[in-house]
Amino acid sequence: MPEFAAKVCVLCGGVGAAKLLSGMVRAQRPKDVLAIVNTADDTQLHGLHISPDIDTVVYTLAGAVNPQTGWGLANETWNAMDALERYDGITWFRLGDRDLATHLYRTQRLTQGANLATVTAEIAASWGLELQVIPVTNDPIQTKITTPDEGEIDFQDYFVRRRHNVAATNVRVAGAQGATPCPGLLGALDNANIIVIAPSNPIVSIAPLLAVPKVRPALIRQRHKVVAVSPIVGGKALKGPADRLLRELGHECSVVGVAKLYAQVASTLVIDEVDAHLAPAVQDAGLACVVAPTIMDNIDKATALAQVVLNASHST
Ligand code: FO1
């Protein structure tokens, strides 16, 4: 059983989490940070196993991510995608030539019998990362979105192919019930000084992490050291469909709605200054509320937010 001696465990989705991690590894020693990453966005395409949230974390922390999109690699070429057009192949999910190497390597190693955690550690190490990056589970879990006119579709169909421009009437994480937390994950949560819920999509990035058995109970048990950062600012998501998903699934699309979603597992919610007037309502939901700049449009702001999160954990 691997041991992850991390002082700070961060529950991560994609872009927002990667930005906070970039700051966290400057506010804290990188090797004391453990990123626990959602894998319910994973998809099989071209016979390859693609782990978008893991790759966004790795590429961002390596300083190699495409800064415009927050996913994939900067300075990419698209020869493989262009060549696939000849065969009318699958090109709606854009895989750059260099990004493809990650999926080829991951798939080859999984085929050899390595588990996702092992392969993720190899990929993170190859990019020179010092922080620890693990999948929430080595078992297959998939987010499935139910839409009014198509029934249940896969996550990337929803997110990319339909540009999350369709209403969701239900979201579930297939495979979660039978999944086992990544070895070492529960121990890391127990031993951490602080557990952070990154500003990721509560419905499709954070909920899948909590759906893996024993993870939610572990946070409930240690709620006093769990600090969440709201991904909703001024009633909107900074990126992606978090705001519309909250509304479509019957939640309040505000920091108060996020507070109510996290009340069981987190004791503090960090909200942006534009939502300062809602701090009392967050407290009424049962969480301490910290007001700070949460829009990480540069590395210094990400570092400052990481420091706010670390300080918040000492104050509860
Ligand atoms: N997102 C898109 O909107 N369009 C794409 O073509 C796309 C390709 C892609 C390839 C690799 C990868 O790791 C991520 C990719 N993403 C793309 C983002 C991905 O759908 C999202 O990052 C997550 O699944 C949600 O956070």
Image (cartoon, helix red, strand yellow):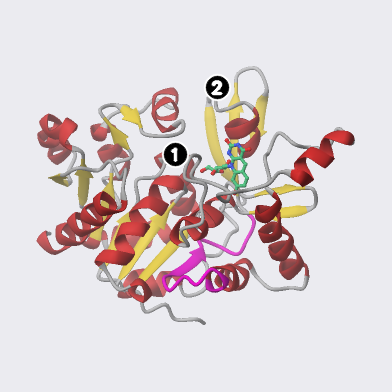
Give the residues drawn in magenta, as a range. 125-140
Q: Secondary structure at mark 2?
A: loop
Q: Is residue 266 visible?
A: no
Q: Examine the image and state in which quarter residue 215 appears.
A: bottom left
Q: Residue at x 65, y 54 (%)?
A: 99
Picture coordinates of residue 311 (x, y %)? 15, 60
Whether the residue carrying mark 2 lies under 8 Å from ligand 1 is answered with no
- First in sequence, mark 2 or 1: give its number: 2
Quadrant of the rendered structure where residue 221 is? bottom left
Magenta segment's dominant SS is: loop
Q: Circle 2: is it few (<14), some (14-19), or many (20+) Cα within 10 Å?
A: few
Residue 41 in view here: yes
Q: Give the residue at mark 1.
A: 203
Q: Which residue is pictured at 60% across the width and 58% down the height?
A: 178
Q: Give the camera-side residue of 131 and 87.
A: 87
Q: Is residue 155 magenta?
A: no
Residue 315 point in image, percent of width and height: 10, 60
Amino acid type, callout 2:
Asn
Residue that mark 2 sits on: 165
Element at label 1: helix
Is 99 placed above or below 188 here?
above
Identity of the residue drawn at 38% across and 73% down = 188
Where 87 falls versus 26 (above or below)?
Answer: above
- Give the residue type that dot 1 points to: Ile
